[in-house]
């Protein structure tokens, strides 16, 4: 009889341990499933955010390129205008100098010079 009781006790303990392990395994499986769902949700959220950031980066890069092209065009246009103003200045300077000489010549003629 003591052997039978020991055998029944061992079987009960074995079944109890297996049952507890099964419950623990089931709880861990549920926890892993919940974590997996949470990770998928986070991954989806960040995928959308990364897509939005990539789109904004592309738009900003295009806008910067357009603005730099406009600035470069303005600089070139201003450079051409500056060259034209410089040429006008030199022509005007030469014309004024020539008028000064013409006035001196006219004054000499009127005063009876030459």
Image: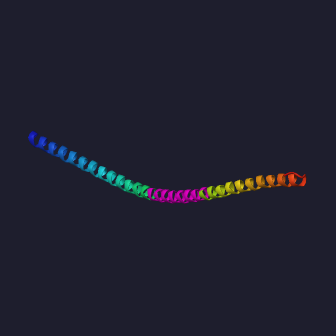
Image coordinates for residue 72, horizontal then vertical, percent: 57, 56
Residue at image location 58% in from the left, 59% down from the top: 73
Residue at the farthest front position: 114
Side (left or right) of 87 relative to 36: right
Figure coloring: rainbow
| 48 or 87: nearer the viewer | 87
| 49 or 10: nearer the viewer | 49
Residue at image location 44% in from the left, 56% down from the top: 50
Residue at image location 15% in from the left, 42% down from the top: 10
Q: Indicate yes or no whether the magenta region holds residue 51.
A: yes
Image coordinates for residue 77, horizontal then vertical, percent: 62, 59
Side (left or right) of 91 relative to 105: left
Residue at the farthest right position: 111
Side (left or right) of 54 relative to 101: left
Q: Quadrant of residue 79?
A: bottom right
Q: Is residue 10 above or below residue 82?
A: above
Is the magenta region chiefly helix, strand or loop? helix
Q: Quadrant of residue 86?
A: bottom right
| 104 or 52: nearer the viewer | 104
Image coordinates for residue 75, horizontal then vertical, percent: 60, 55
Q: Quadrant of residue 36?
A: bottom left
**Which quadrant of the rendered structure holds the N terminus?**
top left
Q: Is residue 66 above or below residue 19?
A: below
| 92 or 64: nearer the viewer | 92
Question: What is the number of callouts on the image?
Answer: 0
Q: Indicate yes or no whether the magenta region holds residue 84.
A: no
Specify start and end residues of the magenta stretch as a single range: 50-75
């Amino acid at each position: 009889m003591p052997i039978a009781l020991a055998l029944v006790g061992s079987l009960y303990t074995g079944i109890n341990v297996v049952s507890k392990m099964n419950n623990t395994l089931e709880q861990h499986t549920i926890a892993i499933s919940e974590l997996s769902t949470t990770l998928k949700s986070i991954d989806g959220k960040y995928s959308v955010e990364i897509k939005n950031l990539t789109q904004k980066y592309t738009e900003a890069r295009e806008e910067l390129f357009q603005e730099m092209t406009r600035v470069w065009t303005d600089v070139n246009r201003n450079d051409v205008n500056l060259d034209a103003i410089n040429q006008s200045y030199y022509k005007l300077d030469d014309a004024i100098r020539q008028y000064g000489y013409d006035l001196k010549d006219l004054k000499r003629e009127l005063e009876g010079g030459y």
